[in-house]
Amino acid sequence: MGDLGSSILTVAEITQPASSQEMAEEKEKLVESWSFLDTVESNFRPLVVIELAKGTKEETIEWLTKRIVDKKANGGAQLLIKPLVTENGVENIYLVGATHLRLLLGAETVGLVKECSDNSMRTFTYSSRKTFKHFADDNHNFLTMAECQYIIKHELENLRAKNEKMIPGYPQAKLYPGKSIVRRLLTNGILVQIFPLHDREELKKLSHSWYGRVKVGYQPLDDIRCYFGETIALYFGFLEYFTFALIPMAVIGIPYYVFAWEDYDKYVMFATFNLLWSTVILEVWKRMCAVLTYRWGTLLMKRQFEEPRPGFHGVLGINPVTGREEPVYSSFKRQLRIYLVSLPFVCLCLYFSLYVMMIYFDLEQWALDYHEEHESNFSSLMLYVPSIIYAVVIEIMNRIYRYAAEFLTSWENHRLESSYQNHLILKVLVFNFLNCFASLFYIAFVLFDMKLLRQSLATLLITSQILNQFAESLLPYWLQKRYNRRMKKRMCSKKTDMDLSLAEQINMEKEMGTYLGTFDDYLELFLQFGYVSLFSCVYPLAAVFAVLNNITEIYSDALKMCRVYKRPFAEPTANIGVWQLAFETMSVISVVTNCILIGMSPQVDALFPDSKMDLVLTVALVEHLLLAVKFIMAFVIPDKPRDIQMKLAKLEFESLEALKQQQMKLAAESLQE
């Protein structure tokens, strides 16, 4: 079923009476009929803001705006653009929009999937627009604001140099055919930023239903998706689901921790439940994710013809699959960069992480010796200081390494955004896993100190959660609130009208922080999942602290999305991507970890007084059996619910039948000629 999307998406277009050639000619005439000077629309709706650097040269502005409004055939984006005019005159800010017709054709270009009148989901095509639910020529709300902004972003990012050798007015900013214009403007500091505008009324409604009042209930995921896009909506859906999934672990963990954490029978029961739990929740999430993304249309979106990412560079060539002009870069050169530079650098960072870990254990030994020598309340508190310091150092190292990993991955010059993200996530996960969990593995399986393991796990988990909450939400919110107060005081001293109200909004939003994506949010959940699944049988309260953290995380993340950061561009997605594999890998590691911990318990060790080899073989056998059960469960539980599978199969059948009819019609026409 995984390849259904590629054959389903053209159903709506194929079933039209006109041939593909006729439809292409009709659309070409339609596009060519637009004048490239058509930059004024009676009902201009600003969607995206472009901020240029102060003092940008007039010839540069003229060239850029001409490329934005120029015809697609001439390498332009064929969008609408106008400067932001205030009482101080024209600023260095430009508003970008598009005609309703242009957005509809753009929706076809990016492959948006919409609901048809027969309740099926199909890719949108302009020629079959009448077959889609809620479509009308005068209904400008057929596409959500987030979808419109995504289309404009796609068109701007695909503005590429044709014959230009440099950016006009800036000889040092070199260009070559195929180079992304927006990327070059950003790297040279000519273009400060591009961001989508907030819809203040819709944001107010969403804020009230999302985090405006404390309530027991589900998040408005459909509303979040309509406003912020599928990627962010899926993250909040996963955060909510993961929080609910942690509750059984927390409920079992509290009495286990209070009454019987040394009881062998409870120890084995909790570890076994941990293993089954980690498998079931990930498989059930796949099903929930399929339901959500089918309803949102992204489960069927094409990905095999993904456009090159803006940062990708190379010699202008022809894509052998699509036949389009685009940059071409040698995969051999990319592999050399990965294996000769990136891989050694990652190994060096891993070695440094282990070196810092050994320093931490020296501090632990110093604190223990100090406590044994002085035996006071102060010395008891000093026992926790090394773990707290190490937790802070881990967070600092993770963030510094993240910047280095981003630079290296960008330097590797990956063609697709998905490939870039996969390589970046792999680099960051390997380092974060070792940095966060190496000390726990060392304590458990080298020092065999369960008391220190519980203390270190609790300290690392709680400290990292407090630091993340402060750095990601509280600090940005406080800084933004201070700026908003200053901005409002300044605006209140001026005469305001509708234009100035828009200017006030833009000036406030352009100073907001930029949301860098869901990477850090998923990484935080991944590390949290590791703390819970790997060692929670030693410290059962890990799930309790995770639930409490995630409840506040939902509200704080919602707050920062609506109040702290600029509105991010929507990004269609069908799942949580490589993070699903990361969580599943962590659950496999947890099987091995929990089995070894059970084998190390004094009760189990007492069952094999004569031969330790029998103990090792027994633990290995149990571990293999549990892994087998885990993989069987993953195979038995379908990734998609039955009704979704039936809908996808029906669309595939209709696609094949429509294709046969189209081929028969073309054959009959050729015979008549």
Image (cartoon, rainbow, N blue to C red):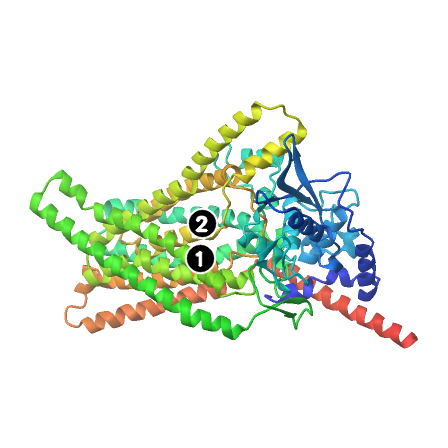
Q: Outermost residue toward the left?
A: 373
Say which of marks 2 and 1 sits in front. Answer: 2
Location of residue 143 in the rendering, given as x and y in whole percent from the top left corner: 69, 46
Considering the numbered disc 2 on the image, is that residue within a helix, a strand or a loop? helix
* Amino acid on which disc 1 is placed: Val
Q: Outermost residue toward the right?
A: 672
Mark 1 closeness class: few <14, some 14–19, many ≥20 residues within 10 Å: some
* Amino acid on which disc 2 is placed: Asp
Considering the numbered disc 1 on the image, is that residue within a helix, a strand or a loop? helix
Which residue is pictured at 22% across the width and 56% down the height?
359
Location of residue 6 in the rendering, given as x and y in whole percent from the top left corner: 65, 65
Location of residue 338 in the rendering, given as x and y in whole percent from the top left corner: 45, 69
Q: Outermost residue toward the bottom?
A: 671
Location of residue 400 in the rendering, given as x and y in whole percent from the top left corner: 37, 53
- Quadrant housing the C terminus: bottom right
Relative to 253, does residue 323 appear above or below in the rendering?
A: below
Cα distance in 3D space between marks 2 and 1: 22 Å
Which residue is the site of mark 2?
521
Which residue is the site of mark 1?
280
Relative to 52, does residue 126 appear above or below in the rendering?
A: below
Which residue is pictured at 25% across the width and 44% down the height?
258
- Quadrant housing the N terminus: bottom right
User: Is 294 on the left-hand or right-hand side of 214?
Assistant: right
Which residue is pictured at 15% across the width and 53% down the height?
365
> Tags 2 and 1 in contact by the CB under 8 Å rule?
no
Mark 2 closeness class: few <14, some 14–19, many ≥20 residues within 10 Å: some
Q: Would residue 259 be seen by someone viewing this image from the given angle?
A: yes
User: Is 25 on the left-hand or right-hand side of 369?
Assistant: right
Which disc is residue 1 wearing? none
User: Is 490 on the left-hand or right-hand side of 389?
Assistant: right
Task: Decide which of tag 2 and tag 1 comes sooner along the chain.
Answer: 1
Q: Could you say which is closer to the camera, residue 509 or residue 522? A: 509
